[in-house]
Image (spheres, rainbow, N blue to C red):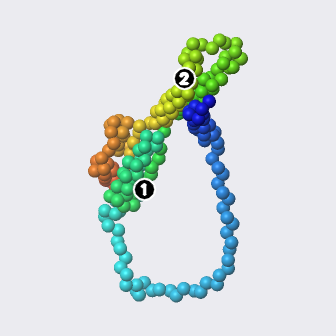
């Protein structure tokens, strides 16, 4: 077996083992916090400052700056679809347009059946590669004659291993993706990529959030009046 064949066999096996290791390895434990050493310092009493001696005027919050305070925008996006850059851009835009607003980014997972199937793909890859490499010993052990398709895979086993690995990774990436970019403001959905089939524009999203904030303020004012 020459170097090229060793490379074609070793690279997919190395990637497969690394995927399986990262899949089943638990996260590392958090390092213990260092003990705090209490040092006794003699603090000198600070001189009291009278409010009349301060000449620095206090800044009052502007009406624009107060719009975002107390409001939360949730941006749930598909992390495996490389949507994080768009989500971060929208987060910065909203925090600039509505100072004080809390923008939370989170992953929008695919449905449960797709998540379960994505866990099966590495097992399928490992099984196919094992059959290609050791099928002549495995089939007799279970009392079977190697089928014709096995010999077709065996004829070009290095190409079959590479194809199995690549197709499995593509399938796993598809199963782990949700294609979502959902934006909610104060618990109400204001934009859904799953419904619209596109991303929101920055001006469009700013207007949607602004309308939702205005509705929230009106609702809060009515609650204060009726209470």
Q: Is residue 108 above or below residue 216?
A: above
Tell me which residue sits at (40%, 52%) in the image. 88
- The image's mark for residue 124 is none
Q: Specify the quadrant of the image occupied by residue 181.
A: top left
Q: Which residue is mark 1?
A: 102
Q: Is residue 140 above or below residue 193?
A: above
Residue 108 % position (x, y) = 46, 41
Element on which disc 1 rests? strand
Choose between 85 and 4: the one closer to the eye.
4
Q: Total of numbered circles in the picture? A: 2
Tell me which residue sits at (44%, 36%) in the image. 178
Element on which disc 2 rests? loop
Choose between 151 and 212: the one closer to the eye.
151
Q: Which residue is mark 2?
A: 156
Q: Is residue 100 above or below residue 74?
A: below
Q: Residues within 10 Å of mark 2 (few under 14, many from 20)?
A: few
On screen, residue 216 versus residue 127, left or right, reads left
Residue 191 % position (x, y) = 35, 43
Tell me which residue sits at (31%, 64%) in the image. 63
On screen, residue 22 versus residue 223, left or right, reads right
Tell me which residue sits at (63%, 47%) in the image. 27
Residue 70 % position (x, y) = 41, 58
Quadrant containing the N terminus is top right
- Can residue 64 be seen here? The reply is yes
Q: Could you give the CA–CA distance between mark 1 and mark 2, rounded to whole angstroms?
A: 56 Å
Choose between 161 and 25: the one closer to the eye.
161
Q: Is residue 150 above or below residue 1?
A: above
Choose between 30 and 136: the one closer to the eye.
136
Quadrant containing the C terminus is bottom left
Query: Quick one: label 1 or label 2, which is nearer the N terminus?
Result: 1
């Amino acid at each position: 077996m020459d170097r090229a064949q060793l490379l074609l066999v070793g690279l997919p096996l190395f990637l497969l083992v690394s995927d399986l290791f990262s899949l089943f390895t638990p996260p590392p434990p958090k390092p213990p916090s260092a003990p705090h050493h209490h040092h006794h310092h003699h603090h000198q009493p600070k001189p009291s400052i009278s409010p009349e001696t301060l000449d620095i005027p206090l800044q009052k919050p502007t009406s624009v700056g107060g719009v975002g305070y107390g409001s939360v925008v949730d941006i749930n996006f598909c992390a495996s679809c490389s949507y994080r850059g768009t989500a971060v851009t929208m987060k910065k835009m909203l925090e600039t347009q509505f100072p004080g607003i809390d923008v939370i980014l989170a992953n929008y997972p695919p449905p449960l059946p797709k998540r379960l199937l994505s866990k099966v793909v590495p097992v399928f890859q490992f099984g196919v590669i094992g059959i290609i490499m050791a099928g002549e010993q495995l089939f007799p052990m279970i009392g079977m004659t190697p089928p014709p398709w096995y010999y077709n895979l065996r004829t070009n086993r290095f190409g079959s291993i590479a194809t199995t690995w690549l197709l499995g990774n593509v399938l796993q990436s598809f199963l782990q993706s949700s294609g979502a970019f959902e934006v909610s403001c104060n618990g109400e959905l204001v934009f859904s990529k799953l419904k619209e089939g596109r991303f929101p524009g920055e001006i469009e999203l700013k207007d949607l959030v602004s309308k939702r904030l205005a509705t929230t303020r009106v609702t809060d004012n009515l609650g204060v009046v009726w209470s």
